[in-house]
Image: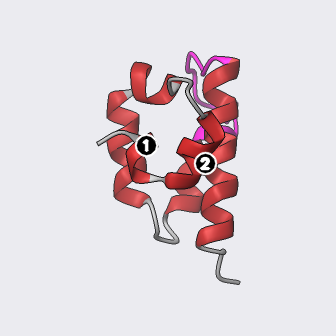
Amino acid sequence: MTLKKLVKEFSTYLRDNESILDRDYPNLIKKIELHWGYQEFYPFMNGLLVNDKDRKREGFSLEAMQELYELNEIHERLFPRKK
């Protein structure tokens, strides 16, 4: 399943544009789908969005980062973090 199909609000955000995440990161999409709707989503996304100096990684394109931030915002609206 694609994120555009899984998350209606993400589809609205993308409009007719293709998701960079759906296209270029299929393994990541599976992990996002697994965590979607659960509180475990937040530490998972934090690990993607925050650069840990101890880890060497290639990183995401600007477009992919924008999509990740948007997904994080959508998830926060739909499934607020528990304090």
**Label 1 is placed on what type of residue?**
Leu
Q: Residue at x 53, y 43 (%)?
A: 11
Q: Quadrant of residue 43?
A: bottom right
Which residue, given by chain and number where applicable, does mark 1 sit on? 3
Number of numbered markers: 2
Work out how far the residue at label 1 is from the one at label 2, CA to CA, in angstroms: 9 Å
Q: Main secondary structure of the magenta part?
A: loop
Whether the residues at callouts 1 and 2 have beta carbons within 8 Å, the answer is: yes
Which residue, given by chain and number where applicable, does mark 2 sit on? 71
Q: Residue at x 69, y 42 (%)?
A: 69
In the displayed structure image, the side of residue 49 where residue 18 appears, left or right = left
- Asked if 13 appears above or below 53 in the picture, the reply is below
Q: Residue at x 46, y 68 (%)?
A: 37
**Sooner in the amino-acid sequence: mark 1 or mark 2:** 1
In the displayed structure image, the side of residue 20 where residue 68 appears, left or right = right
On-image quarter of the C terminus:
bottom right
Q: Callout 2: helix, strand or loop?
A: helix
Q: Residue furthest bottom?
A: 83
- Asked if 32 appears above or below 51 in the picture, the reply is below
- For disc 1, the neighbor class at 10 Å (few under 14, some 14 to 19, many from 20) is some
**Label 2 is placed on what type of residue?**
Leu
Residue toward you, 59 or 6: 6
Residue toward you, 21 or 55: 21
- For disc 2, the neighbor class at 10 Å (few under 14, some 14 to 19, many from 20) is many
Membership of 23 in magenta stretch: no
Q: Callout 1: helix, strand or loop?
A: helix
Residue toward you, 83 or 22: 22
| Place of residue 82 in the rendered image (x, y in percent of width and height, measured from the top left) | 65, 82
Q: Quadrant of residue 64?
A: top right
- Please provide the residue range marked out in magenta: 48-61
Q: Residue furthest front?
A: 16
